Image (cartoon, helix red, strand yellow):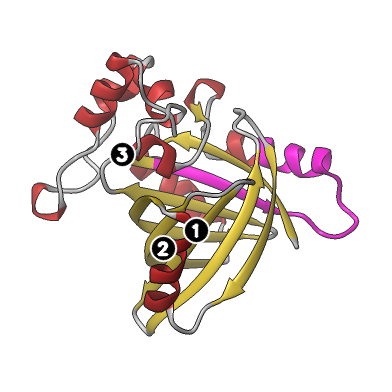
Amino acid sequence: MGRNVEIKAAARDWQAQMARAAALASLREDLRQEDVFFHSARGRLKLRTVATGSGETASLISYNRADTPGPTASDYVLCPVADAAELCRLLAAALGRQATVRKHRSVFHCGQTRVHFDDVEGLGRFIELEVVLRPEQTVAGGAALARAWMERLLIREEDLVTGAYADALTGGGGIGANLGTNPTFTAAMPQAFPASEGGSAVPKLARMGGGGDASP
């Protein structure tokens, strides 16, 4: 089992924040990801397919993370998958599908911290920080690193959102509710996907927040 300390935030200035991450990173990866979430009695369960320039891989991921803003511990188990389509059919039949999240993710590797710039279809643009804890590290130590990266990337407390992208897409709250009550982002967030790729999430988030029925 692995353990991270994570935060998720709305991107306040996508290009400027990405430039800061690029200047501090040792490696950048650009990925297309599709996460199929399944109903789970404990935590969250998703089947992730990742496409890169060299091919496609898939993993089944189970994780537990509290839906709270700020640096939060996330415990996860990851299992590589050879036949993603067949496993998806099996899990859908056994558990039921919750949502499908599609995104372009740029990953900047900065020491033990992974900085994700996520352009999420139907939601908008977000930044995730994942501090990969070493065996001897505490959650508090990881949280301190996450907050240091928040400062480097100009992420403010009011930018933080809670929950998972899947919850927002199914109207559960969290991300949609957070942003719907913050006019900075409902009015100014850049378009996530051009019309040719499925439309922007900004109007959707504004509607979700206004209706009071969203959760990430």
Verify CB contact (< 8 Å) between mark 3 and mark 1. no
Q: Nearer the viewer, mark 2 or mark 1?
A: 2
Please report the bounds of the magenta region as a residue range: 126-148
Verify CB contact (< 8 Å) between mark 2 and mark 3. no
The picture places residue 5, in percent across and down from the top left corner, at: 69, 45
Sort mark 3 into few (<14), some (14-19) or many (20+) by Cα contacts within 10 Å. Answer: many
Residue on which disc 3 sits = 123
Please tell me the numbered disc located at residue 46. Answer: 1
Q: Nearer the viewer, mark 2 or mark 3?
A: 2
Q: Residue at x 33, y 19 (%)?
A: 209
Disc 1 is placed on an element classified as strand
Q: Residue at x 59, y 32 (%)?
A: 67
Disc 2 to disc 1, how far (Cα)? 14 Å
The residue type indicated by label 2 comes to Ala
The picture places residue 193, in percent across and down from the top left corner, at: 20, 48
User: Is 183 situated above or below 99?
Assistant: above
Front-most of residues 149 and 170? 170
The picture places residue 23, in percent across and down from the top left corner, at: 51, 55
Residue on which disc 2 sits = 93
The residue type indicated by label 3 comes to Leu
The residue type indicated by label 1 comes to Lys
Q: Nearer the viewer, mark 3 or mark 1?
A: 1
Chain-order first, disc 3 or disc 1: 1
Disc 2 is placed on an element classified as helix
The picture places residue 177, in percent across and down from the top left corner, at: 40, 22
Q: Residue at x 61, y 73 (%)?
A: 79
